[in-house]
Amino acid sequence: MIYEELLIESEKSGIKIKEKSLKYGFKGLYKNAKVIINSNIKTNNEKSCVLAEELGHHFKTVGNIVDQSNQSNKKQEKIARNWAYEKLVGIVQIINAFKDGINTRYEMAEYLNVTEDFLEDAIQHYREKYGEYYRIDCYMIYFYPFFGIMKIF
């Protein structure tokens, strides 16, 4: 999903998006159906990753969770990130990339319009969720010890 599509989807959900410079290393912030994306982010792929996570906060978390020294806040942050991983790097999207001849993580990140770091974190999320592998239809996605996809007959 590209950044512009996420912007349109956000507007349809009544969420206002604004880009402006943020301090203290924040890439995005969410509060009361408003998202701010750091305008210093250079690529739309990274903006998509940040926006998806902030939308995860809208749909899945509550309250002010900026203080990440609080364990409850860390859990809510993880919930929002996991939502973003499944939104932008879904299992079916991974299979579609494989079907379209995508062979490397770099190519897959580009194909899915996400950063390589985001893709890596999404793979880790699925490893935690499914274990070593996940089977869907005639495909096997391996998450451990190496990430890979195989068509099975």
Image: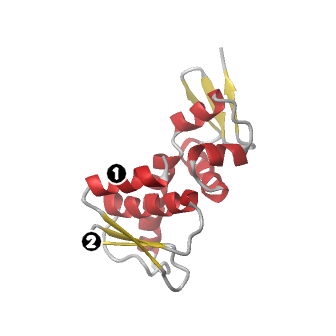
Residue in view at x 70 percent, y 44 percent:
107
Query: SS class of the residue under badge 2?
Result: loop
Query: In this orientation, does residue 134 appear?
Result: no
Tell me how far mark 1 sits from mark 2, CA to CA. Answer: 17 Å
Structure colour scheme:
secondary structure
Q: Can you say whether 141 is above or below 35 in the image?
A: above
Q: Position of residue 57 (x, y in %)?
A: 37, 64
Residue in view at x 29 percent, y 62 percent:
15
The number of callouts visible is: 2
Determine the image quadrant of residue 64: bottom left
Q: Position of residue 101 (x, y in %)?
A: 69, 30
Q: Can you say whether 100 is above or below 41 in the image?
A: above
**Type of the residue with mark 1:** Glu
Determine the image quadrant of residue 25: bottom right
**Type of the residue with mark 2:** Asn
Residue in view at x 65 percent, y 53 percent:
120
- Upstream in the sequence, badge 1 or badge 2? 1
Relative placement, left or right, of 116 versus 29 is right
Q: Position of residue 10 (x, y in %)?
A: 33, 56
Residue in view at x 62 percent, y 35 percent:
97
Q: Can you say whether 24 is above or below 73 in the image?
A: below
Where's the C terminus, which quadrant? top right
Q: Which mark is residue 9?
A: 1
Of labels 1 and 2, the one closer to you: 1
Query: In this orientation, does residue 54 appear?
Result: yes
For disc 2, the marked residue is: 32
Rate crowding at label 1 as few (under 14), some (14 to 19) or many (20 or more) other CA atoms within 10 Å. Answer: few
